[in-house]
């Protein structure tokens, strides 16, 4: 690998993106199963992940015996996921589609999107279309586990997160920085920088991208436009299934459990 910075979409480098989030996989998968047991009407066998990316959760849940459906717009991520499934001799229905508008051949028992993929939908109509598509895909009594960051009204708009993960000889260090926040337009611009080290070799990547912003009240108003989905409970990224929280202006790292009417 060359010692140079590449300005590119980090989703085009799924092998590094996947390492960056791998430590979250078991905790998230455990919570998905626990939420299905607690909130689904009946057994949850068939699961959907819109914006599945590299498919770390698709593979994990398939290995646990679930039937998985995954969709994403990133061709490199989908190719990576298909190789992962083949290598582990797992099966899943994986295809290219836009999370803002999609349809499935048959209903699923539950769907999940655990980490800010929803915020890539930059308009109210796209977010509404996504929730309507999920609602159409769920069977009656099925649930949608939706996780993303809310922005409390008094939150610091300029923040930096840093973390590192390692797999074998490869270490991936991530710096995620908020560059600009526009509360009126409800858009924040972020920059992610990756530093990948493999022995003496280094690879640097920079990707700037926008996210849609939500307060608790703004998400409540959006959800009211999709009456098929009712809010059951709210959690945070500690995923403590026995300790639901209150949806208010204090919560930031938010996981919503939504259920389709029976």
Image (tube, grey):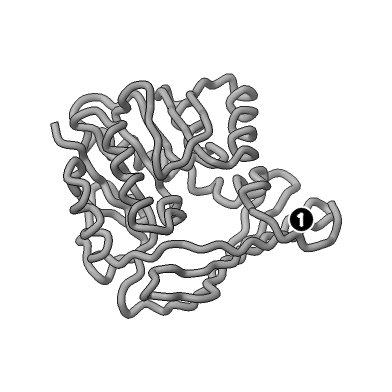
**Residue at the spot x=46%, y=62% of the render?**
211
Residue nearer the viewer, 67 or 9: 9
**Residue at the spot x=38%, y=61% of the render?**
149
Where residue 20 appears, x then y in whole percent? Answer: 60, 52
User: Most extreme residue toward the front, as rendered?
Assistant: 125
**Residue at the spot x=59%, y=35% of the render?**
78
Determine which residue is flagged by label 1: 197
Q: Looking at the image, is 150 positioned above or below residue 11?
A: below
Asked whether, in this view, residue 22 is left or right of residue 39, the answer is right
Residue 179, located in which quarter of the rendered image?
bottom right
**Residue at the spot x=41%, y=23% of the render?**
67
Residue nearer the viewer, 9 or 141: 9
Residue nearer the viewer, 120 or 162: 120
Helix, strand or loop for disc 1:
strand
Where residue 19 appears, x then y in whole percent? Answer: 62, 47
Asked whether, in this view, residue 220 is left or right of residue 187, the answer is left
Residue 151, located in which quarter of the rendered image?
bottom left
How many discs mark residues in the rendered view? 1
- Mark 1 crowdedness (10 Å alpha carbons): few <14, some 14-19, many ≥20: some
Residue 207, located in which quarter of the rendered image?
bottom right
Q: Quadrant of the C terminus?
A: top left
Residue nearer the viewer, 229 or 235: 229
Where residue 245 appears, x then y in whole percent? Answer: 22, 58
Where residue 43 appears, x then y in whole percent? Answer: 25, 24
User: Most extreme residue toward the left, as rendered?
Assistant: 262
């Amino acid at each position: 690998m060359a010692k140079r910075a590449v300005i590119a979409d980090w989703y085009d480098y799924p092998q590094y993106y996947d390492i960056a989030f791998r430590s979250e996989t078991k905790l998230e998968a455990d919570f998905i199963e626990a939420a299905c047991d607690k909130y689904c009407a009946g057994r949850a066998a068939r699961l959907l992940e819109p914006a599945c990316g590299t498919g770390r959760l698709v593979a994990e849940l398939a290995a646990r015996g679930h039937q998985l459906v995954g969709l994403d717009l990133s061709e490199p991520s989908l190719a990576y996921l298909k190789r992962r499934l083949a290598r582990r001799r797992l099966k899943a229905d994986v295809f290219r589609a836009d999370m803002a508008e999609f349809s499935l051949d048959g209903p699923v028992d539950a769907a999940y999107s655990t980490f800010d993929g929803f915020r890539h939908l930059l308009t109210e109509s796209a977010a509404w279309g996504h929730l309507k598509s999920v609602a159409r895909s769920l069977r009656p009594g099925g649930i949608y586990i939706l996780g993303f960051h809310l922005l409390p009204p008094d939150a610091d708009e300029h923040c930096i997160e840093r973390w590192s993960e390692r797999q074998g000889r490869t270490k991936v260090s991530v710096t995620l920085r908020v560059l600009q926040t526009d509360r009126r337009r409800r858009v924040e611009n972020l920059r992610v920088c990756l530093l990948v080290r493999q022995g003496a070799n280094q690879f640097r990547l920079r990707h700037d991208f926008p996210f849609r912003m939500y307060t608790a009240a703004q998400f409540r108003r959006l959800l009211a436009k999709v009456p098929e989905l009712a809010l059951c409970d709210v959690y945070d990224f500690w995923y403590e299934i026995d300790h639901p929280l209150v949806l208010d202006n204090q919560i930031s790292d938010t996981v919503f459990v939504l259920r389709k009417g029976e």
